[in-house]
Image (cartoon, rainbow, N blue to C red):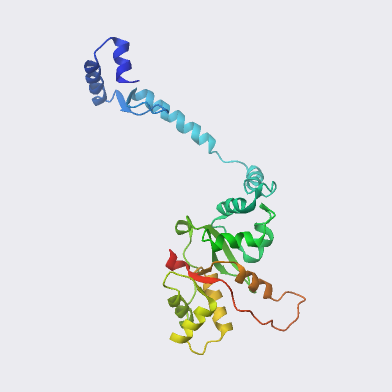
Amino acid sequence: FTSAAAAARFGLGAAVTEGALQRLAANGRVVQGEFHPAGIGQEWCDAAVLRRLRRRSLAALRHELEPVPPAALAQFLPQWQNLSKHSLRGIDGLVRAIEQLQGATVPASALEKLVLPSRVAGYNPAMLDELTAAGEVIWAGAGSLPGKDGWVSLYLADTAPLLLPPPHPLELTALHQSILDTLSGGYGLFFRQIADQVRATTHPDVLDPQLADSIWELSWSGLLTNDTLGPMRSLLGSGRTAGSTAHRAKRGVPRGRYGSLTAAA
């Protein structure tokens, strides 16, 4: 209740009512604050009544957060992730899916074959490239896997500084450090630009395959990223599988611009 309502109820002047309420507040009998959901200004409430209301509110909130059986969780998660409905479509749908997946590590080989297509109807890799090239989405490695695969996670650029984990442990070589130094300016460089800079400063004889291997080691560790997933697709597509020919395919030069995640953070 307000001071004006109390004054009207008991037929007292506003100053007299306010003084009486202040004395009651000093004795702990009433509490002053903004209690009405509509925000009607300063109000008064009996201290015991307010404690009772708070206990009931907390009890109601705890009831909403009660644990559920594993079966209920298993039923909820696919629906929440839009795995069965395919209600997410287009770029906006992809952004929504990435928002839910932020920080979750998945095998890079499964990201665009299983994870995203199962959530976004009509998913096309060009959709993700559009978001990464525009700087709206960042991908980060979280450790390598056997073969040419690795763990990867996606982040919205606005929340990435808060959600990106520390880099995966990697024993840095002199070549690794030279690559990181080249990208320490906070801007992205193409592979050829990195190669030219590294050769001009510390490793004049390094070959493209050696440099590419080091870049991928840094990428899987979460120290580097790229403004497109094209290089990752090329890497995964060049890996040998059971039944493939035994000769080693020639590796193409990685495309897209690489940048340091630590410098960006």
**Residue occupying the point 45% across, 74% down:** 183
Residue 187 in the figure: left or right of residue 14: right
Write the residue at 64% across / 62% down: 126
The image shows residue 39 at horizontal and vertical percentages of 39, 28
In the picture as drawn, the residue positioned furthest to the top comes out as: 11
Question: How many numbered marks, from 0 up?
Answer: 0
Say whether residue 44 is left or right of residue 260.
left
- Residue 4 location, x and y as percent? 30, 17
**Does residue 67 appear in the picture of this structure?**
yes
Q: Quadrant of the C terminus?
A: bottom left
Tell me the quarter of the image containing the N terminus: top left
Query: As rendered, which of 101 and 134 lies closer to the eye?
Result: 134
Q: Quadrant of residue 131?
A: bottom right
> Is the residue 176 above or below the residue 260 in the image?
below
- At a point 69% along the width and 61% down the height, the residue shown is 113
Determine whether 165 is above or below 220 in the image: above
Work out which residue is located at the far bottom of the displayed protein and give it. 205
Residue 94 lies, in percent from the top left, at 61, 54
Q: Quadrant of residue 68?
A: top right
Q: Position of residue 187 (x, y in %)?
A: 45, 70
Residue 7 horizontal side relative to residue 113, left or right: left
The reply to whether residue 105 is in sight is no
Residue drawn 65% across the image and 46% down it: 74
Could you say which is closer to the camera, residue 191 or residue 58?
191
